Amino acid sequence: MRTVILAEPDDFTGWRDAARALAAEAVPPEQIIWQVGEAGGDLFAEATTPPASVSVAFSVPRAFVDLARDVVLHSDAERFALLYTLLARLRSEPGLIEDRADPLIRRLDHLAGQVRRDIHKMRAFLRFREVADVEGPRFVAWFEPEHHIVRTNAAFFIDRFAAMRWSILTPALSIHWDGKTLSEGPGAQKGDAPGGDPVEDVWKTYYASIFNPARVKIGAMLKEMPKKYWKNMPETALVPGLIATAQARESGMIETARASIGGNIQVAWEALRDEAAECTRCPLYKDATQTVFGEGPVDAVLMFVGEQPGDQEDLADKPFVGPAGQIFDRALAEAGIDRASVYVTNAVKHFKFEQRGKRRIHSRPGAGEIEACRWWIDQERMLVKPRMTVALGATAARALFGRTMTISHERGRPMALPDDGGEAWVTVHPSYLLRLPDAAAKKEAFARFVEDLRMAGERAARK
Ligand code: URA
């Protein structure tokens, strides 16, 4: 038997070096014991070859390294052994990493997904509270991760809060940033972190501003914000009151809250976009490259909603940049609308397609996918609050109104949107223009489309 002692539970480098050496010697997985943090042990209790001198006899796909980096952070005690088993199999089955049906790949993918979700939850739900010490303000947060993600996540918080002095306390580890260097300390207890402070007001106001009483769904809220985190989040203190007064709340209250957070709308929008990047509300995330979120100024008065990203948008991570985007841009220009001044998004944020050989063929999103994705468009609209939202095609109209709409019936006039005082304008999707076979019909349809955009734009510009 070989015993590998890893320095820390998230010791990817230690696992990788040992695994390389063992794989080069063709040591079978069942002959290795993987252990974390036992002081005094050599890396290999019975190994003859130190890992540093091993020349690696085979290379592994990049996807394996990415998977291993995530899986190593999982709390499952078998993770190192499972990864090593995959590494050993890759020697004789180099294409295995692509085989989503293989039970080992499925299991490791599942572990990696849980780790990514935990990373995301730490980013989304951790809240700093302000304390003062002799050197000035310091921000302290308490978080209980499910996996060993704290070190990996440190870079995110340094990037976001580079100028602040902060500490993140967790049961297994604490990390501290003094504005220049990151240091580590032992685990802590919840009582070591302080209670409420003014920082919470920003979050409370943000939360009140995006809280839509007409759509209170506790189940959905809990799904996004697991109960485990509720007790630590200042904004959840607002929830009972918000629900109790749900019927009575006027949109004016939301306006007031929104106005008071001013520039934080941008911060809130970025937080929303980051959350959407991890969206698993429907299965489309599995095959798409990424979530393609909306883009544009958060104070835009005019918003455009398309159907879903296409092949090019999925790769570029930007809405409307492919063939439909080009015709959309041309129509905007003819309607006298500057694309940089408007907010452009899609009803469904992941590309749905059918793989045919090397080509990915667009496939229409279903009602369930549109419904699942309404969560994001609702929140984008609650933050941006456009005066006018243009639905480009039937999918967008359905997402905005929550029911099937016939474009030809609704086109050409402003319509009040449910819940929020904004207006919508329904028109065709630009790809409809691309599909028209006859040049004269195309020209006429394009002119009508431009006219729709112009009228919607003018209405949005009115005070
Ligand atoms: N079609 C859409 O509906 N949206 C895009 O972003 C691109 C094409």
Image (tube, rainbow, N blue to C red):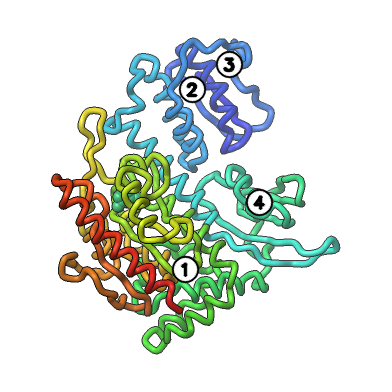
For the point 34% across and 46% down, the residue is: 326
CB at disc 1 and ligand 1 closer than 8 Å:
no
Dot 4 or dot 1: first in sequence order is: 4
- Give the residue number, with chain letter if any, for mark 2: 32
Separation (CA) of disc 3 from disc 4: 32 Å
Residue 333: which quarter of the image?
A: bottom left
Separation (CA) of disc 2 from disc 4: 29 Å
Q: Position of residue 283 (x, y in %)?
A: 29, 49
Q: Amino acid at mark 1?
A: Leu
- Give the residue number, with chain letter if any, for mark 3: 46
Asked whether residue 395 is in view, the answer is no
- Pair 2/4: label in front: 4
Q: Position of residue 359 (x, y in %)?
A: 25, 32
Q: Is residue 190 above or below residue 430?
A: below
Q: SS of the residue at dot 1?
A: helix
Q: Is residue 193 left or right of residue 372?
A: right
Q: Is residue 237 left or right of residue 328?
A: right
Residue 188: which quarter of the image?
A: bottom right
Q: Residues within 10 Å of mark 1 (few under 14, many from 20)?
A: many
Q: SS of the residue at dot 2?
A: strand
> What's the mark number on residue 187?
4
Q: Is residue 93 above or below residue 259?
A: above
Q: Amino acid at mark 4?
A: Gly
Q: Is residue 153 left or right of residue 364?
A: right
Q: Position of residue 94 (x, y in %)?
A: 36, 18
Q: Nearer the viewer, residue 7 or 380?
A: 380
Q: Residues within 10 Å of mark 3 (few under 14, many from 20)?
A: few
- Give the residue number, with chain letter if any, for mark 1: 383
Dot 1 or dot 3: first in sequence order is: 3
